Amino acid sequence: MTYPAYAKECGFVLLFFIPIGINGRFAKAYSKISAQAKDGILSQISLEESWYYGFIGTGYCTTITALVTRESSP
């Protein structure tokens, strides 16, 4: 059985100087997608980085998508 998994984490740089939640984005997103996989195998992993301007800074997001494969029980 194969099904898709998705995880997204974002951070913000306030006033283009003060980082908020920036450093742990990749680790948090990977933890989320690993939790979705449970005992399955992650394959076709895709990592996407995006950003956006806010009024008082810049936001950065990390998105991980993958396929989870599990052995079906008889």
Image (tube, rainbow, N blue to C red):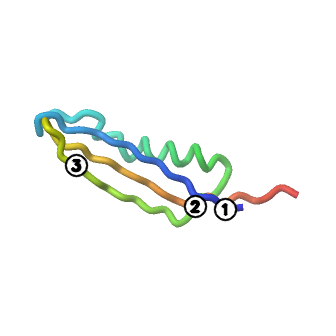
| Image-based side of 55 in relation to 32, left or right | left
Which of the image's four quarters has the C terminus?
bottom right
In contact (CB < 8 Å): disc 1 and disc 2: yes
Among the 4 quarters of the image, the one containing residue 21: top left
At label 3, which amino acid type do we have?
A: Tyr
Say which residue appears at 19% left-offset and 38% top-offset: 13
What whole-number distance in Å separates the C-alpha atoms at marks 1 and 2?
7 Å
Say which residue appears at 83% left-offset and 55% top-offset: 73
Return the x and y of residue 66 as percentages of the image width and height: 52, 59
Q: In the current view of this chain or complex, which residue is farthest to the right?
A: 74
| Image-based side of 25 in relation to 16, left or right | right
Which of the image's four quarters has the N terminus?
bottom right
At label 2, which amino acid type do we have?
A: Leu
Residue under pointer 1: 2
At label 1, which amino acid type do we have?
A: Thr
In contact (CB < 8 Å): disc 3 and disc 1: no
| Image-based side of 5 in relation to 12, left or right | right
Q: Quick one: SS at disc 1?
A: strand
**Mark 1 neighbour class, 10 Å CA radius: few under 14, some 14 to 19, many 20 or more:** some
Residue under pointer 2: 67
Query: Does 26 appear above or below 57?
Result: below
State the mark number for residue 17.
none
Among the 4 quarters of the image, the one containing residue 72: bottom right
What whole-number distance in Å separates the C-alpha atoms at marks 2 and 3?
27 Å
Residue under pointer 3: 52
